[in-house]
Image: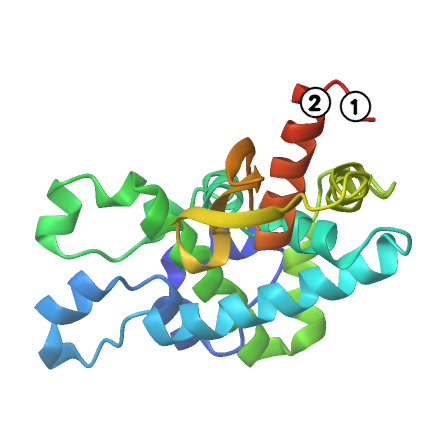
Amino acid sequence: MKGYEPLERSIGYDFRDKALLRTALTHSSYANENRTQSSPCNERLEYLGDSILGFVTADWLYRKTPKIPEGKMSRLRAELVCETALYEAAEQLQLGRYLRLGRGEEQSGGRNRPSILADATEAMIAAIYLDGGLEAASAFIHAFLLTREIGTEPEGDFKTELQEKVQREPGRSIAYELLEESGPDHCKVFTFRVCIDGREAGRGTGHTKKEAEQAAARAALQDAGEAR
């Protein structure tokens, strides 16, 4: 597959099984239009790549940030592996120019569509894993996705702080309510509100439910002038 050598140089990995690379770059629209060519699409590879990316990122965060709680680790992982991050990696590699797309997807701008490029990046991770093992896939993930500086200090426990404040007066109640859940599975955004004595006291969003609840509690404390 002569046309893929520049991409392999950019990735820093030379495929032994070139068919894996071709499949990683094959969108379902192309496979559907070329069934006689036996061209599988990259959806199965994308599924596998998502899991590999999640594992490698979680392992890296666990080792790099020994002081931060699980909730913040989940938020950081979501930020590192979200569609935007995957799209930016694809742009860096100019992955769009190598995609195999159906005619309709090509004409509608699919070569530059963030969701398609993000999916292809995950498929690329799986293709590298199947061809060269976890070490090779991990090297790719570290080189193109785990490059951001991240904070390592633990955040305040605003839920506990708010709970203690409310419970200073007997008979008062506090409750958290999920208002909205949006975004793809690998980059969910949750919106919560906290109600004190049945009345809304603050709202917050986050990539995990715990983070969104903490943000809502912080908003309530800030409104009361007591947030740290």
Q: Residue at coordinates 46% horizontally, 56% vertically from top-left?
A: 121
Quick one: label 1, few (<14), some, or many (20+) residues within 10 Å?
few
Q: Is residue 146 left or right of residue 53?
A: right
Q: Which residue is mark 2?
A: 222
Quick one: label 2, few (<14), some, or many (20+) residues within 10 Å?
some
Quarter of the figure that contains the C terminus = top right
Q: Determine the image quadrant of residue 155.
A: top right
Mark number, residue 226: 1
Q: Residue at coordinates 69% horizontally, 46% vertically from top-left?
A: 171
Quarter of the figure that contains the N terminus = bottom left
Mark number, residue 8: none
Q: Determine the image quadrant of residue 102.
A: bottom left
Q: Is residue 186 left or right of residue 213?
A: left
Res 64 seen here: yes
Q: Residue at coordinates 40% horizontally, 54% vertically from top-left?
A: 184
**Position above or below: 61 against 40:** above
Res 145 seen here: no
Q: Position of residue 133 (x, y in %)?
A: 65, 79
Q: Secondary structure at mark 2?
A: helix
Q: Is residue 52 left or right of residue 143?
A: left
Q: Position of residue 185 (x, y in %)?
A: 43, 59
Q: Position of residue 162 (x, y in %)?
A: 74, 38
Q: Nearer the viewer, residue 6 or 107?
A: 107
Query: Cα distance, mark 2 to mark 1?
Result: 6 Å
Q: Nearer the viewer, residue 47 or 199?
A: 199
Q: Position of residue 90 (x, y in %)?
A: 47, 46
User: What's the residue type where badge 1 is placed?
Assistant: Glu
Q: How many marks?
A: 2
